[in-house]
Image: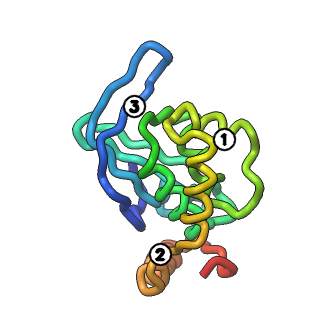
Amino acid sequence: MEGIILFEGNEGVKRLRLSPLVELEGRAVPFVGTTGIDKWTELGVGIRFPDLDKAYLWGLVIPHLMVQSWRGMKFLEHVEIIDPGHTLASCWYAGGDRKLEKSYTEHLSEAGIPYLKLQVLRAMILNQRPVEGELKNAAQKLRHFGIDVDDVEE
């Protein structure tokens, strides 16, 4: 994956669901990053499985919400099962301050964060943000490549 990794979360062991019948287990490192290095790149939340040589990222082309992506990364640290098609987007949306749609809460429950635990985690994680210096450095790195960052979040 060509892109930029801006933040890395805490490593843990997680299961990667490739299909309903195929799951692999390995070390997993959540991160915030991009899919490329131009202004049309996606910025979002991702996960690397170094032992499995796999990485996945889910994000948006516009707007580039670094803080929401960072919070989504924090939710990924609590997930047990990664379904790349659903888990990453669900964690990213959980990191936002809007009401979470039912489909995202269901995906997170299947991934190991049941509804009540999700509510506790949201109350905690939505009050956190990256360290200010790290956030400014990440924004400068993105702007160096011509990637816009949402200033409202900074």
Number of other residues with Cα within 10 Å of mark 1, as a class: few under 14, some 14 to 19, many 20 or more = many
In the rendered image, the vertical position of residue 98 relative to residue 15, given as above or below:
below
Q: Is residue 77 above or below residue 81?
A: below
Q: Which residue is mark 2?
A: 130
The residue that mark 1 highlights is 105
Residue under label 3:
16
Q: Between marks 3 and 1, how big is the CA–CA gap?
A: 19 Å
N-terminal of the pair, mark 2 or mark 1, is 1
Real-space Cα separation, disc 2 to disc 1, in angstroms? 24 Å
Residue 90 is left or right of residue 76, and the answer is: right
Is residue 153 left or right of 112 when viewed as pictured? right
List x then y, in percent, for residue 16.
39, 31
Quadrant of the rendering where the C terminus is positioned: bottom right
* Callout 1 secondary element: helix
Q: Position of residue 25 (x, y in %)?
A: 30, 30
- Tell me which amino acid carries mark 3: Leu
Q: Residue at x 54, y 62 (%)?
A: 71
Q: Which residue is found at the position 39% from the left and 62% from the top?
A: 5
Secondary structure category for the residue under label 3: strand
